[in-house]
Amino acid sequence: MTIQSKRLYLLREEKLSKALLKLGIPTMIGMMVSALYNLVDAFFVGRLGQSQMAAVSIVYPVSLFILGLGLLFGSGAASILSRLLGQNKTDQASKCASTALFTSLGIGWLLILLMVIFIKPLLFMLGSTQSTYPYAHRYGILFIVSLAFNIFTITVNNLIVSEGASTVSMTALLAGGIVNIILDPIFIFIFHMGIMGAAIATLISRLISTIIYIHYFMSGQSQFKICFKNFSPSMSYYIELIKIGTPMLVFQILTSLSLSLTNLSASAYGDATLAALGIMTRIMSLFSMALFGFMKGYQPLVGYNYGRQNMERVHQATRLAVIWSTGFCLIISFTLLAFSSPIINAFSNHSPAVLSVGKWALMLNAITFIGLGFSAVYSSYFMALGKAKQAGLISIGRQGIFFIPIILISSHVWGLNGIIASQPLSDIFSIIMVLFLIYKNKKEQESLTPLKAINESSPS
């Protein structure tokens, strides 16, 4: 059996528990390793001082914006690709994948160039203060340059996961993550490069991941061919890509905006508060990315079987994903609540000011993290089925519709406590909205035949 045949069997016939594990665990590990880039930087940079830690926190939202751009085309294409492969339309899949990747790179590299040129106003817009700007500038320049490789890896990661190549995705991200962990202390402390050393380590590690992905396509292991010959910038492709991928872009833009608003609001309380909230954000991001990584494995399984009109397999996979993801969130939440103090201290070099804010923030976010698995499953479910409206509302809700007005109001009314409580409150409202969307979708599906429902969201 060829590699391609094994992947199709995995999506189509493998026992669901095995299929979800084989598809989800590698992408889960890969996404966790991706999140470790920023967490490792925070761990080592935190030992340099509060201002340096605050500087890393200020630059962090930039990576989320580029992540969103990669997901716009990567996730948009992944949803289409899994359904095209389910319908045996390999040539169309190759054109879709090539169009998504080259468009993503063109737009991404242009934006990265503009960010480097306008680095100073950008950093102050993100919440930099006079004391943190020198460190943010040193770290930010090289970190933004490294995003040129990151936009490639994010887009390609989504493309190959759609064909069931989750192990390749894990290998590429894991290799880059290990290199980053090794190089960070060497450049920062042994070579005495300080905060700039962390940025150099990140740049090199992202280059390593890029090389592994390029080798994958050049070796002919993929079911679709990525080349300029297959680049087909037609309006039909872009409409479908944007329709499906926009929720992910909007989610990342709003996440970046929410972090910037948090930094701007927290900057009035000093560098220690900025550092504390930055540590909390990276810790929660690690487990959120793990959860979203598992959903990246779940999504092609659902999309492929939806394309084949196998709705029973779609529903069974969804139920299993909800159970597993909720169990994961419960374990993480109780762990963070039990060990909040030592976790914050590990990143703050035992600063009392950072600990007092960071512990409170981590505990509140850990409580509402319990419901994130449920929301993540149905966000991926709607995206896999091509239901951009529902997926978009879930993405926009958590970091936009709810978070932005909450932080603007609560920071003014309750000060620092209001800033800390903004994300947990937003999560609660988001879960309520997801429940409403599920109920509404169930009623709509009951009024449609399976074939009609599939045709309504099939790629053109």
Image (cartoon, grey):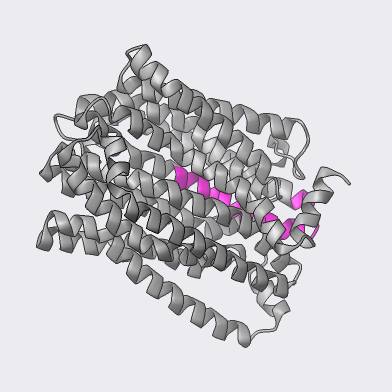
Q: State the image quarter where residue 408 is shown.
A: bottom left
Name above or below for residue 52 compared with residue 301: above
Q: List the single residue furthest toward the top.
A: 191
Name above or below for residue 144 compared with residue 325: above
- Residue depicted at x 81% and y 44%: 3
221 to the left or right of 433:
right
Quarter of the picture holding the C terminus: bottom right
User: Which region is colored magenta?
Assistant: 67-92
Q: State the image quarter where residue 351 is shown.
A: top left
Visible residue check, residue 107: no
- Residue depicted at x 29% and y 52%: 362
Name above or below for residue 347 compared with residue 245: above
- Residue depicted at x 16% and y 34%: 129
Q: What count of labels does the image hold?
A: 0
Visible residue check, residue 247: yes
Q: Which of 167 and 97 is in front in this view?
A: 167
- Residue depicted at x 34% and y 28%: 44
Magenta span: predominant SS is: helix
15 to the left or right of 249:
right
Is residue 91 a member of the stretch shown in magenta? Answer: yes
